[in-house]
Image: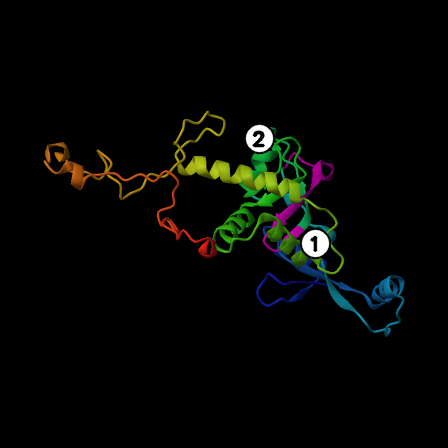
Amino acid sequence: LWRCSSCFGGRVLCTSCILSCHQYNPFHEIHGYIHPAAALARMSSRWGCSLANDFGYFKRLSLQEAGLQVGLGHDGDFCPKSSPSDSFKMTIVHINGQQPVTFRECCCEIKERWQLLLEYNIFPATDQQPQTGFTIEMLEHQRTFSLRGKTSLYEYYQALLDLTNAAEGPTQYVYDQLRGGSRQFRGLDMRMRAGIPDATAPLADGVLCIRCPACPQPGVNLPPNWEQDPLRQLHYAQFLGGDGNFKLQRLAKRKSARHDL
């Protein structure tokens, strides 16, 4: 028996039903029912305690353990040229934690594996036989927490591990891969925002910067005859700050040492 915490209602389903409901939602948080006999043996071997014979519980498991395989390259369906032997396993980090996922390879040989993963909003840790991937939703989620909450990447990943399994701990530690992947994602995102489609093209100085919309820019926000304005140096002056500190706290601080910060 299985139930999903991400789906509305959290109905208890059999294995075939839970797989059919999550063929296109492979990152949901599901829990599998541990039979009383298995729970008794597990508890007794781990903590040396005895439990009632009718004691059973739901434990967080992965859809991979339920037998789910996700097809690549054909809108989530299996490639007609593929077979079960063409499957491969990856560790996927999502906003609800990290989990193992089994994918079915596309055998059409049109796109590489990392390209197929990007089509499904999975950012691979490498382009050479990736074994770890991060959902785009998680990377954007982490960036928002970093900007708004000042949460470091390490603390964010530790929170994901707690969401995965706070009691037993993770089975795989992929913080180093996440650190490199988040940097690559931010770099590619800045290129896209700057209108640079080529990820390998050399960058000139300042091309990724966003110009201040309030600063005068000829041909953008200035009138056609702005150069003929006698007060153009006053009306269209541009102010530049070398260090970006526009508040200048403690600029004229007191001379007394006891007032120094």
Q: Is residue 23 visible?
A: no
Most distant residue in the top direction: 202
Residue corresponding to mark 1: 62
Tell me where residue 89 sits by quadrant: top right
Q: What label sits on residue 111 in the rendered view? A: 2
> Residue 37: x percent and y percent?
86, 66
- Give amino acid for label 1: Ser
Quarter of image, res 28: bottom right
Could you say whether the residue bearing mark 1 is in a helix, strand or loop?
loop
Vertical side of 50 occupied by 149: above or below: above
Marked residue nearer the N-terminal end (1 or 2): 1
Q: Is residue 241 left or right of residue 12?
A: left
Query: Which type of secondary structure does the marked residue at label 2 adopt?
Result: loop
As for residue 88 lying within the magenta part, the answer is: yes
How far apart marks 1 and 2 lie (CA) works out to 28 Å
Instruction: Look at 65% across and 45% down and name the residue there.
Output: 175
Nearest the viewer among 259 and 64 is 259
Which label is found at residue 19?
none
- The percent position of residue 19, horizontal first and vertical second, equals 66, 54
| Eye-nearest disc, 1 or 2 | 1
Residue 36 in view here: yes
The structure residue drawn at horizontal position 12% and vertical position 38%, both measured from the top left corner, is: 231
Q: Nearer the viewer, residue 162 or 92?
A: 162
Residue 237 in the image, given as x and y percentages of width and height: 21, 39
Task: Report the amino acid beneath label 2.
Answer: Lys
For image coordinates 41% across by 31% down, the residue present is 196
Give the residues drawn in magenta, as a range: 80-98
Say above or below: 6 vs 190. Answer: below
Mark 2 burial class by Cα count in 10 Å: few <14, some 14-19, many 20+: few
Residue 39 versus residue 92 in the image, above or below: below
Point 71% across, 58% down: residue: 165
